[in-house]
Image (cartoon, helix red, strand yellow):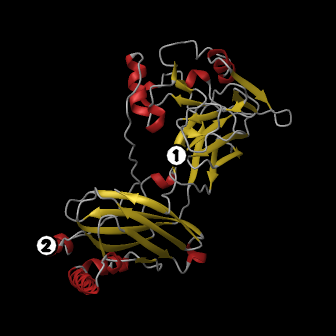
C-alpha cells in the first residue's frame, strides 16, 4: 500500500512488488479459482483493498450480493482466515443486510508473516436463538427474556411457546457477545430448565463462497507452488469457533472460589479491592429470597428503590445509582434481576469511587457471576446463557 512510504521512489518500488505478487498469485491459484466459481453460483462478490499488507495495516473488504432480494434480505457472512503454510485459522462473522457489508480488520503486530487465504462463506440465515423449556407446564404459553450485550444494548421481551414448549428469538443484531436470561412471567424465583441452540454456531454448508489470497509482511520466498496451488478450503461441516479470553487471578478466598475467579474474572473486574461474596461454598446466598434483599443485608449503605410506575427495582449507594453486571456485562437500569440466588457462584462488590467503565455511575458496582460448567450442581436450573453475536465492523486480527 503506497501511502505508507515517504518518497516517490519507494512508492514505485512498492507498487512493482504488489504487481509482481498479484501476478504470481493469479498464475499459481487458477485451479482454486475454478473451484470457487463452482461454489459461487448465486453471485457473491467480495473486494479486498489490497493483496499485500504490513503489520499494523488495516485490511478492509466489501461484500455484495446483487440478487439478495431473491436469495436473502438478511444473511450472515463468515470470514475464515487461514495461514496457507501452517493451517492456523481465525474466524469472524458479519451481518449481510440488503446484500451488503463493509468492514475492516487491523492486522496486529503479533500476526505471523506469510500468505493467507481469506475464505468468505455465505449463510442464508441470520442470528437467532432457538430453545425448549424442559419443565414447562401445560398452561405456560409465554416466556420472558432479557438480552444484554457488551455494548449495553438491551432487549426485554416475550417469546411464544408452541405445543412442544419450544420457542425462537429471531433477527438479533449485536456485536461481540451478550448474556440472555429467561424467566416465567409473573414468577419471583427462577426455576426454568432450558436448552438452547444458536444455529449460526452450528455446522453449516454455505450457499456461496469466495476466497481471496493476501500477503502479510515481506514473504516473497513463501510464494511457492507448494504453499498456494495446493491450497483448497473445504467448508464441509464448518462451525463457528469460540475462543475464550484470558483471565487473571487476584483474590484471597477458598480454593474453589479462587479457581472460579481465575477462570471468570477479567480486566478491571479482577481487582483485589472488591468485597467478594461466596455462593459456591456457603448456603447463605442460596437460601436468600432474592438478590435484592441479600445484597442490601450484606452491603452497608446499599439501598433498593422501586419505581412506582413500572415496579422495577434498582440499587443506589450513597444516593447514586449502582452499576449492576451479570458475568461482566452491564445491565440497563430497567433490566430486572431474574437470577435465582442459588444459581450465583460469586458476587463482587466495588465501593463508590471504583471505576470499571469510563461512563460508570458514582454509586459503586456489583458484579454477579452465575454458576457455569463444572461449578453447576445437579439441582441448578439452566435459564441464562452467553451467546456470540457478530464481529464489529472495526476489529483486530491477532
Residue drawn 59% across the image and 41% down it: 180
- Tell which of 114 and 339 is nearer to you: 114
Residue drawn 39% across the image and 32% down it: 263
- Residue 257 lies in what quarter of the image? top left
Q: Residues within 10 Å of mark 2 (few under 14, many from 20)?
A: few
Total number of numbered discs in the rendering = 2
Asked if residue 126 lies left or right of residue 45, the reply is right
**Location of residue 219 with respect to 201 vertically, above or below:** below
Could you give the CA–CA distance between mark 1 and mark 2, rounded to whole angstroms?
A: 42 Å
- Tell which of 137 and 312 is nearer to you: 312
**Location of residue 156 with respect to 58 vertically, above or below:** above
Measured as percent of width and height from the top left, residue 154 is found at 65, 47
Measured as percent of width and height from the top left, residue 396 is found at 40, 58
* Sequence-first tag of 1 and 2: 2
For disc 2, the marked residue is 221
- Residue 148 lies in what quarter of the image? top right
For disc 1, the marked residue is 387
Residue drawn 32% across the image and 80% down it: 2
- Tell which of 352 and 26 is nearer to you: 352
Residue drawn 37% across the image and 29% down it: 249
Measured as percent of width and height from the top left, residue 170 is found at 62, 54
Disc 1, SS: strand
Amino acid at each position: 500500500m503506497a501511502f505508507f512510504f515517504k518518497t516517490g521512489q519507494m512508492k514505485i518500488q512498492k507498487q512493482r512488488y504488489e504487481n509482481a505478487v498479484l501476478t504470481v498469485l493469479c498464475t499459481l491459484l487458477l485451479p482454486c479459482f475454478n473451484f470457487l466459481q463452482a461454489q459461487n453460483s448465486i453471485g457473491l462478490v467480495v473486494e479486498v483493498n489490497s493483496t499485500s499488507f504490513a503489520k499494523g495495516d488495516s485490511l478492509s473488504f466489501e461484500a455484495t450480493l446483487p440478487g439478495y432480494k431473491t436469495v436473502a434480505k438478511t444473511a450472515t457472512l463468515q470470514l475464515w482466515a487461514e495461514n496457507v503454510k501452517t493451517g492456523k485459522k481465525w474466524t469472524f462473522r458479519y451481518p449481510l443486510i440488503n446484500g451488503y457489508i463493509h468492514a475492516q480488520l487491523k492486522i496486529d503486530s503479533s500476526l505471523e508473516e506469510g500468505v493467507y487465504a481469506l475464505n468468505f462463506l455465505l449463510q442464508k440465515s441470520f442470528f437467532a436463538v432457538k430453545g425448549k423449556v424442559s419443565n414447562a407446564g401445560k398452561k405456560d404459553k409465554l416466556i420472558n427474556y432479557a438480552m444484554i450485550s457488551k455494548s449495553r444494548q438491551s432487549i426485554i421481551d416475550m417469546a411464544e411457546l408452541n405445543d412442544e414448549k419450544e420457542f425462537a428469538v429471531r433477527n438479533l443484531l449485536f456485536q461481540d457477545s451478550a448474556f440472555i436470561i429467561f424467566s416465567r412471567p409473573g414468577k419471583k424465583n427462577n426455576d426454568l430448565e432450558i436448552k438452547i441452540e444458536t444455529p449460526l454456531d452450528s455446522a453449516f454448508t454455505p450457499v456461496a463462497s469466495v476466497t481471496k489470497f493476501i500477503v502479510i509482511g515481506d514473504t516473497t520466498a513463501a510464494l511457492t507452488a507448494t504453499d498456494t496451488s495446493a491450497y483448497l478450503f473445504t467448508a464441509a461441516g464448518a462451525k463457528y469457533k469460540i475462543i475464550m479470553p484470558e483471565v487473571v487471578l487476584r483474590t484471597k478466598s477458598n480454593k474453589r472460589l479462587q479457581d472460579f475467579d481465575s477462570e471468570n474474572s477479567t480486566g478491571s473486574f479482577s481487582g483485589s479491592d472488591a468485597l467478594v461474596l461466596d455462593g459456591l461454598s456457603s448456603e447463605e446466598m442460596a437460601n436468600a429470597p432474592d438478590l435484592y434483599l441479600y445484597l442490601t443485608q450484606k452491603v452497608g449503605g446499599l439501598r433498593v428503590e422501586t419505581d412506582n410506575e413500572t415496579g422495577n427495582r434498582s440499587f443506589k449507594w450513597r444516593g447514586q445509582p449502582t452499576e449492576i453486571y451479570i458475568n461482566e456485562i452491564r445491565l440497563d437500569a430497567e433490566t430486572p434481576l431474574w437470577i435465582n440466588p442459588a444459581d450465583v457462584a460469586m458476587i463482587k462488590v466495588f465501593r463508590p469511587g471504583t471505576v470499571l467503565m469510563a461512563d460508570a455511575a458514582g454509586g459503586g458496582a456489583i458484579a454477579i457471576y452465575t454458576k457455569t460448567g463444572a461449578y453447576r450442581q445437579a439441582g441448578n436450573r439452566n435459564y441464562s446463557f452467553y451467546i456470540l453475536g457478530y464481529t464489529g465492523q472495526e476489529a483486530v486480527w491477532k
